[in-house]
Image (cartoon, rainbow, N blue to C red):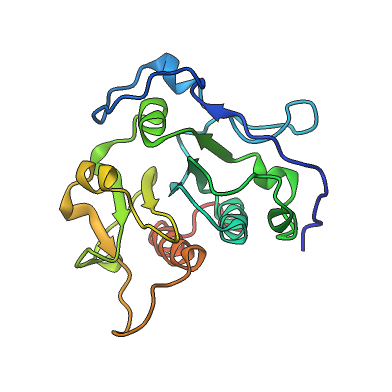
Amino acid sequence: MLASTRVGIKAAVAGSAGTKRRSIGWGGSTAAAGRDAQPVGSNRTLPVRRHNRSAMFHVVLVEPQIPPNTGNVIRLCANTGAQLHLVGPLGFALDHAKMRRAGLDYHEFAAVRVHASIDDWRRAEAPDPERVFAFTTRASRSYADLAYRGGDWFVFGSETGGLPEQLRAAVAPVRHLVLPMRPGNRSLNLSNAVAVVVYEAWRQAGFAGAR
């Protein structure tokens, strides 16, 4: 198991605090905006990686609230080659003690990018709207019915509120997906749900890059 670190992690957030927030459509970004988002970490202590648009998959957590869940997803993405995007406002600091207890190492934080808002994420990353999939309990189409491909975006809402209406409206209903479960039960833990989706997509890709 990777050794845990007691060093605090600083988040460089995409977009400046003074940036005017506005709703934008898919593809409303510029090349310059795409350079604004920064990986997590102190540049003096962590050799960070630039955004990798050729990442196998992109996982987007919108307004996550529970530190251990995000810590588990960071570890998942590090082990599968996926790029993780955290969209604020976050419900915790990235140097939270429970994040450190997850045993995260520097190289795992290196692939995390933080965006101040949904609009900032869309502006900075300009994801292909045809390859953005929103996971919600309100959907009727199973995640297992899709053929995924490299570069796809998997978007998950917070543990308490789910996907914001802004995102549900932006993603076509045909790309709203659900993880089947037995009736009468509570939803899966967020990090478990992300793991199910990422591993299915990676399986379809022949576990490319695995040892």
70 left or right of 175 in image: right
For image coordinates 25% across by 31% down, the residue present is 26
Q: Is residue 206 above or below residue 186?
A: above
Residue 123, above or below 118: above
Looking at the picture, how far across and down is residue 197, in whole percent?
A: 40, 62
Q: State the image quarter where residue 201 is shown.
A: bottom left
Q: Is residue 131 left or right of residue 157?
A: left
x 77%, y 41%: residue: 8
Which part of the image, by quadrant, shows the C terminus? bottom right
| Residue beneath the point at 49% across and 59% down | 207
Q: Residue furthest top?
A: 32
* Quadrant, the N terminus: bottom right
User: Is residue 24 depicted above or below 99 in this figure?
Assistant: above
User: Where does residue 93 sit, x and y in percent of width and height?
Assistant: 64, 44
Q: How many marks?
A: 0
Q: Specify the quadrant of the image occupied by residue 68.
A: bottom right
Q: Position of residue 123 (x, y in %)?
A: 36, 26
Q: Nearer the viewer, residue 108 or 116?
A: 116
Q: Residue 125 location, x and y as percent?
A: 40, 30
Q: Residue at x 39, y 42 (%)?
A: 151
